[in-house]
Image (cartoon, grey):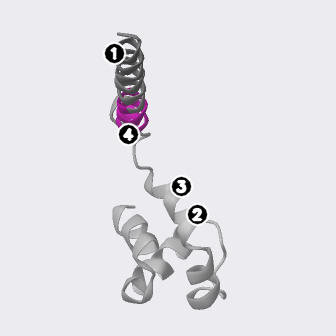
Amino acid sequence: MKRNRILAFVTRAARTLAACAFALTFFATAEPAFAKDPQPYNAADAARKYCGRAYKRYCANVPAAGIQALDCLKQNVRRLPPACRKAVQQL
């Protein structure tokens, strides 16, 4: 009789631990699905972030601010890294 009680206790404890492990796993992996929408893509910010090296390499002789810098990057669009290219094409 005592052995049955111990076995029942261990079984309940194992089930409880398994349920807790499942719940933790579910919420840990489901968190991104419940997260807020990411911020919208801003091409100008992306260009500043991803085009610095490309600008220095291909457009160093052009003033950094203004339409001339953007025109220079657009003229070299095939040489730009993918993230920079995407930003420049959307400006």
Q: Residues within 10 Å of mark 4 (few under 14, many from 20)?
A: few
Residue type at mark 1 is: Asn
Q: Nearer the viewer, mark 3 or mark 4?
A: 4
Residue type at mark 4 is: Thr
For label 3, the residue is 45
- Tell me where residue 50 appears, x and y as whole percent: 54, 69
Q: Residues within 10 Å of mark 2 (few under 14, many from 20)?
A: few
Residue type at mark 2 is: Lys
If the image is split into quadrants, where does the C terminus sit?
Answer: bottom left
- Mark 3 touches mark 2? (CB < 8 Å): yes
Magenta span: 22-31
Q: Residues within 10 Å of mark 1 (few under 14, many from 20)?
A: few
Taking the spot 41% from the left edge, 85% from the top edge, the residue there is 75
Assess whether residue 56 is covered by the magenta stretch.
Answer: no
Q: For residue 4, which numbered disc appears in the image?
A: 1
Q: How many marks?
A: 4
Q: Kindly tell me whether residue 35 is visible in this rendering.
A: no
Q: For residue 49, which numbered disc appears in the image?
A: 2
